Structure formats: structure tokens, C-alpha cells
Image (spheres, rainbow, N blue to C red):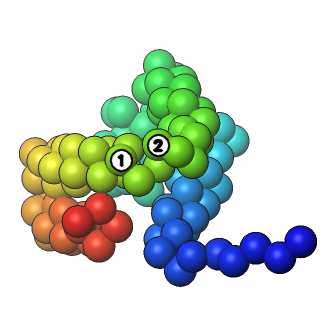
Amino acid sequence: MTTSFPLAHISSVLAAAVLTFGGMIPLFNPHFAMSSLVLPQRITASKEAQFIMALGMARTITIGFDEVDIMLFILGSYLRATDAYICWQEGVPKKAIFRGTASAAIAP
């Protein structure tokens, strides 16, 4: 059986792979995952925050392929703004600008 894979699906498969495999990091090491998001130490050390991070990422990696396109646009737009705002509020404006613009490449 031969099937053709449309090239238009590559971005969705790439985004799904990033969400799936990147989303597994908080399940095994939530402190590292939150530290890589430039969250302050008071938050990354909190067991409650680590639990919520792991739970939230577990939900993220279970999104089905049918919803990936729509969900990535919605999630990307919302998270891009939230990421940049939180980084800005925590006093790292260069990181806020970088994260806001870099996220635009994934979810325009």
C-alpha cells in the first residue's frame, strides 16, 4: 500500500512532535522545565507549581492530530502574549522580546 504524505502537513507534524516530546520534560523534571522558562526561583521551587506544570503538560501532549492546527494557533497566540508579559513583569525584557518574536515563527 502506497500513500503520499502532503508537504503541507510537515509543520503540523513538527509542532505535534515538539509538543509531545517537549511536553514530557515536566513529567520527569518539572523544576528544570520551569527554570528553562525563566521563571523565578520562588516559583520553580514550589511543589504545587511543579505539580501544575506536570499536569498541564500532560494535558497538552494528549491533544489529537485533528485539533492540532486550530489548537496550535490558539495556544500559540495566547502563550506568546502570556510568555512575553510574564518575562517582562519579572524584569527580563530582552527575554520577553525574544520569546514573543520566536513564538511567532511557530504560531503566526
Q: Amino acid at mark 2?
A: Glu
Image coordinates for residue 44, horizontal then vertical, percent: 43, 37
Q: Amino acid at mark 1?
A: Ile
Image coordinates for residue 94, horizontal then vertical, percent: 14, 69
The quadrant in which the C terminus is found is bottom left
Image coordinates for residue 12, horizontal then vertical, percent: 49, 63
Residue 53: image tag = none
| Circle 1 crowding by C-alpha within 10 Å: few under 14, some 14–19, many from 20 | few
In contact (CB < 8 Å): disc 2 and disc 1: yes
Residue 70: image tag = 1
In the current view of this chain or complex, which residue is farthest to the right? 1
In the current view of this chain or complex, which residue is farthest to the top? 48
59 vs 104, left or right, is: right
Task: Give the residue at x 30% y 52%.
Answer: 73
Residue 67: image tag = 2
* Closest to the observer, 86 or 106: 106
